[in-house]
Image (cartoon, grey):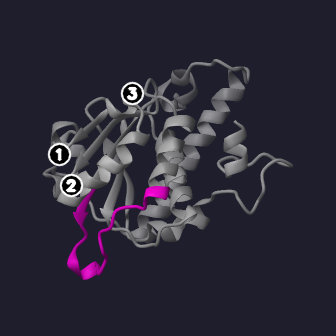
């Protein structure tokens, strides 16, 4: 809870520094190329968060970490009742040539920060981590990062298996052999993703208050939408 306040994940009056608060506007430019996407659900009904390494458009900085945290918060809001895990799909395929982007691995310092946040501040959220299109240098990178990954997290990661083995084809983009004809248009996707996420969060908090604002309430009940009651 202290980390969420100090890192800027939540806004607590008189506790959160407004300059540190992570907002959609603050990290929007990080996603202009669609390097992180919330698209579809896997075979176990986990919302899918895609990290597309080839679409990297900024230099290594804390802003990249803030962007990932923002997207983690968003994908959690997309979890349906009865689900509390997410699927992380990491693709190292290069972006189309016309985008003029260079595929590069994140720095070791950024990777360590991200791993620390995932393992210590989002425990049990990672249901499955899939890696695909890994170049030869990628395995060297993983060997360097490997010691910082705890065994339990490592047990949830799968390398170089087709995404179609874990995500229904109707939920999967055609670039991964699915049938979903998806194209990222930032000015359309970004505001709509945030609009839907905000509505889901409002519904969650509405249920929290309706059920007594008590610790230990069922996540199933908290995520239930009125149309599903």
Horizontal side of 193 relative to 100 (left or right) equals right
Query: Helix, strand, or loop for circle 2?
Result: loop
Per the rendered image, the range of residues in magenta is 91-109
Identify the image quadrant of residue 96: bottom left
Horizontal side of 92 relative to 38 (left or right) equals left
Horizontal side of 225 relative to 18 (left or right) equals left
On the image, the x and y values in percent for residue 28 come to: 52, 67
Residue at x-position 78% and y-position 45%: 12
Marks 3, 1: nearer the viewer: 3
Query: Helix, strand, or loop for circle 1?
Result: loop
* Mark drawn on residue 160: 1
On the image, the x and y values in percent for residue 60 come to: 48, 67
Residue at x-position 37% and y-position 29%: 151
Q: From mark 3 to mark 2, how far is it between C-alphas?
A: 22 Å
* Mark drawn on residue 88: none
Image: 44 above or below 146: above
Q: From mark 3 to mark 1, how far is it between C-alphas?
A: 19 Å
Asked whether residue 196 is in view, the answer is: no
In primary-sequence order, the first of circles 3 and 2 is 2
On the image, the x and y values in percent for residue 146 come to: 35, 43
Based on the picture, tell me whether residue 99 belongs to the magenta stretch: yes
Residue at x-position 17% and y-position 56%: 174
The number of numbered discs placed on residues in the rendered structure image is 3
Image: 5 above or below 206: below
Callout 2 environment at 10 Å: few (<14), some (14 to 19), or many (20+)? some
Are the two marked residues, 1 and 2, in contact with CB atoms closer than 8 angstroms?
A: yes
Image: 80 above or below 163: above
Asked whether residue 146 is in view, the answer is: yes
In primary-sequence order, the first of circles 3 and 1 is 3
């Amino acid at each position: 809870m202290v980390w969420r306040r100090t890192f800027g994940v939540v806004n607590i009056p008189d506790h959160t520094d407004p300059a540190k608060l992570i907002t959609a506007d603050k990290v929007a430019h990080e996603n202009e190329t669609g390097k992180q996407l919330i698209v579809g659900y896997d075979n176990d009904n986990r919302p899918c968060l895609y990290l597309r390494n080839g679409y990297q458009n900024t230099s290594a900085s804390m802003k990249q970490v803030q962007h990932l945290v923002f997207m983690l918060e968003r994908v959690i809001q997309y979890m349906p009742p009865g689900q509390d895990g997410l699927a992380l799909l990491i693709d190292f395929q290069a972006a189309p040539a016309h985008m003029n982007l260079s595929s590069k691995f994140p720095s070791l310092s950024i990777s360590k920060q991200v791993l620390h946040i995932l393992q210590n501040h989002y425990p049990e959220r990672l249901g499955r981590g899939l890696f695909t299109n890994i170049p030869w240098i990628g395995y060297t990178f993983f060997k360097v990062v490997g010691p910082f990954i705890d065994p339990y997290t490592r047990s949830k990661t799968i390398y170089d298996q087709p995404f179609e083995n874990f995500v229904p084809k109707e939920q999967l983009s055609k670039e991964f052999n699915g049938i979903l004809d998806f194209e990222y248009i930032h000015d359309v996707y970004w505001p709509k993703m945030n609009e839907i996420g905000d509505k889901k969060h409002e519904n969650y908090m509405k249920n929290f208050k309706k059920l007594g604002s008590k610790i230990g309430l069922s996540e199933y009940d908290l995520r239930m939408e009125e149309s599903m009651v």
